[in-house]
Amino acid sequence: MTEWIGLSRATEGVPGSAPPPEALRTPAPTEGPLVDTYGRIGDDLRISVTDRCNFRCTYCMPAEGLPWLPKSEILTFEELTRVVRVFLGLGVRSLKLTGGEPTVRAELPKLVRMLRDLDPDVDISMTTNGFLLDRLAGPLAEAGLDRATVSLDSLLRHRFQEMTRRDALDKVIDGLRAAEAAGLTPIKLNCVVIAGTNEDEVVDFARLARENAYEVRFIEYMPLDAEQRWERAKVVPSAEIIEAIDRVYPLIAEHEGGVEPASTYCFADGAPGAIGVIASVTEPFCETCNRLRITADGQLRACLFAMYETDLRTPLREGASDADLQELIRRNVWAKWEGHKINHPDFERPTRSMSMIGG
Ligand code: SAM
Ligand code: SF4
């Protein structure tokens, strides 16, 4: 068991990597939910099913892509299902499929069916760029997917192309319609707002939310782009986005804080749809974070910005029992740090960028 506890390849020997937290060396509770030393409970699992993507969003990936993981390093559907079964036994109640781009993983509906068969009630959703949803929404819904979140940063064709490096706005809109028709609702849209690029569209997005009963979630640009072009001046504070929308469509705050990272607002005139903001940079929500992440190569990360990971793939492939996996998971979650330090001079970017984690 002990030989499986330690740093993963992703951080080993990388200059600036944090040492393993002290809590990793102390035994975690052996019963009850997945708790950390700050009392937070991890019950939301984000599963990256591939590091590959058919888009090249400027705030995420370089134009030429990244060195993709070899197939042999990616968890098989059987391995993923086994790990998820262990997490469900530890109290996880919601699963989010992500990537890279999850829909480029072959036979994704088969995985959804395998996960659904584990538990008829667990919430299963997916974050996608929407490009392949026109043909996959139906099969995914049939396999047991509950909901889809579609990433959409601009409603203008030329700007969409500039931001994603793909001329694909129409196809994504078709995918969005297919997701609605398949019942993957309520639909959420994720929109990364970047100063000087698309902040002039936030009111247009609010109108889209009202007209289609979508929840549009504006995400602050985070320092997780592979090309390291992020700068603070490019972050549009969520408070400014809410003010801009409120001037045109008055809003009422619905939910602030809690375990959901998005603060949500409804329209004061009773129109359908909602607005959410994920203010990871200007108003971090680390103290209530309930999220856990598994990368496509089977590394557990208790934080988007984690500097250490627990390798679940090696023990899985070396015959670890469910009890062994549970202990590794409990220790990693127990050792979750207080929070990322984006606003601190000591902040260091993790070695993985967004598409290698999943968002
Ligand atoms: N490919 C899928 C997609 O784009 O929806 C799923 C993976 S993507 C990494 C998950 C989410 O992270 C997307 O909504 C994307 O817009 C967001 N994202 C990517 N890079 C980001 C960054 N640097 N800051 C904030 N959000 C980012
Ligand atoms: Fe691909 Fe999603 Fe990253 Fe865009 S944000 S490059 S769609 S993984």
Image (cartoon, rainbow, N blue to C red):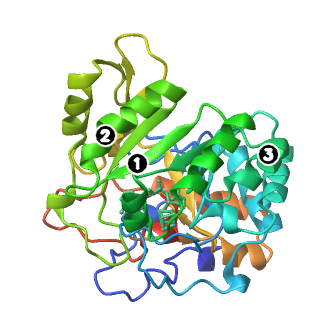
Q: Nearer the viewer, residue 167 or 146?
A: 167
In the figure, is residue 350 to the left or right of 324? left
In the figure, is residue 196 to the left or right of 52? left
For disc 1, the neighbor class at 10 Å (few under 14, some 14 to 19, many from 20) is: many
- SS under mark 1: strand
Residue at 68% from the left image edge and 53% from the top image edge: 133
> Is the residue marked 1 within 8 Å of ligand 1, measured from its CB?
yes
Residue type for callout 2: Val
Residue 96 at least partly seen? yes
Q: Nearer the viewer, residue 324 or 45?
A: 45
Q: Of the numbered discs in the image, which one, if any, rests on residue 191? A: 1
**Residue extending furthest top?**
269
Q: CA distance from mark 1 to mark 2?
A: 9 Å
Q: Of the numbered discs in the image, which one, if any, rests on residue 138? A: 3
Residue type for callout 1: Cys
Quadrant of the image where one finds ligand 1 = bottom left
Pick whichever of labels 2 and 3 is earlier in the sequence.
Answer: 3
Residue at 40% from the left image edge and 48% from the top image edge: 191
Q: CA distance from mark 2 to mark 3?
A: 30 Å
